[in-house]
Each structure stands twice: as C-alpha cells, then as structure tokens.
Amino acid sequence: MTSSTAHATPTPDHRCVFCAHDALDVVLEETPHFLVIADHAPLAEGHLLIVPRDHYACYGALPAEFDEEALELRERVIAFLTATYRAPIFFEHGVFRQTVFHAHLHALPLGAANSGFADEVRSIGSLAASPDALRAWYADQGHYFYLDTERDGSGGREPLLFPADLEVYFQVMGTLRTHTAQTAAWIPPAIRQMQGGAKMRAVAAAWRGYYGD
C-alpha cells in the first residue's frame, strides 16, 4: 500500500473491529484503501459505512492521495442508495464522540426527508468542508463533526464542518433524528443491533443485484 510522504501508514490495532477485516460481517466492496460495509446497527435499511483499511483516526487524518478513490467510492454509494433506497447524507464524528476509534463515514438514506435538512443544519453554524479544509481543521484543532447532504434537491453535494461543541452536536443530531424519523422510526442502538442482521443481509443482496457483484 502506498503511503503519503506527510502521513505514515498507521499500525493496525488488534483491538479495533475495523482493522480486523476478515471479521467484518458484511463487506459490500473493497478498493485499495477502503471498504464499504453495512452498519451493524443501522438507523435505517441501507445504512452503510465507508471505512479506510488502515487505522486512521478520522477522515481528517487521511492523506490527500486517497481523495480521488474516496470520491469515486462515495459516488458509487450515492448511486446505489438513491436508486435502491433514498438519496443519502454522509456524516462522520471525527474523533468527537466516536464509538469505534477508526475513521468511518456513515452513509444514511434520507430521501424526501433530506428536503430542508441542509438549510436547518447550516443555520446552526458550519464551515464549508473540502477534504483539504477537513485536514487543515484536524491538524490545527483536532475534534470536529462532519456532515454532507444533498443541496436543495439539485443532486449537488454540500459538505459541512462543525466545531466539536456538545450543544452544536446535539442540535445537528437532533435535526438528523427528526428528519430520519420521516422515513424510518428512530430505534435505540441496542435494539437496532439486535435487528441489524436482517437489514445487513438485505442491503448486501441489493448491492449485489445493483452492481452485479
């Protein structure tokens, strides 16, 4: 695997569930630096994760040489979710309120509930979040919360970066919870995990059907 001159390839962590690739339940696609997997406690059927193979702390820590590959993979996820479920949003906790300390980008089908979502979260207070801006923020300030949503139903994307502030975080997540509830009931994490197996198998079958893998 090629490493960046500015970012040494991290050492795998044997305690990390995302480093143990062979132990992951449902891997939908693999590229040189990333995996697409089904979330084991999905907020809705179709909830996916894009996970770097190597043990980076967050997307802000990824080297710039991964950007094109990551963008192409996101486009594949967008095409699949839009055609099969609903248009997705993407979000990442950075290293702020992570539960697994390995970079992972959530892709959550939101669809019609996406309408107005970008306006609501933008009003909470955010910055534009290109990959370079994300890296610069992480290098300078560390913690962040990242969210990428469809812009005004036009198909364009609007990546947003929020400071690691609990009040802001709960405002953004509360808005996400409200909009998600329009397409799927909000279920506590423990129950989502118990019910996750069937949804993981369903999204895996749908992915194979869509991409013919």
Image: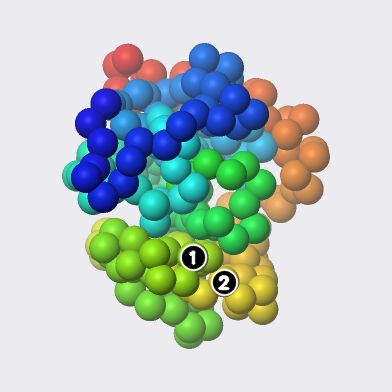
Q: Give the residue drawn at x 39%, y 56%.
A: 60
Task: Please indicate whether residue 174 sits to the left or right of residue 27 in the image.
Answer: right
> Quick one: SS at disc 1?
loop
Mark 2 = which residue? 164
Place of residue 156 in the rendered image (x, y in percent of width and height, measured from the top left): 25, 62
Task: Please indicate whether residue 128 sits to the left or right of residue 176 in the image.
Answer: left
Q: Amino acid at mark 1?
A: Gly
Q: What is the crowding at mark 1: few (fewer than 14 residues within 10 Å), some, or many (at least 20)?
A: some
Quadrant into which the C terminus falls: top left
Name the one closer to the observer, 7 or 213: 7
Please tell me which of labels 1 and 2 falls first in the chain: 1
Q: Give the residue drawn at x 26%, y 50%.
A: 6
Name the one closer to the observer, 103 or 122: 103
What is the number of the mark on residue 142? 1
Q: Give the residue drawn at x 64%, y 58%.
A: 97
Q: Give the residue drawn at x 46%, y 50%.
A: 58
Quadrant into which the N terminus falls: top left
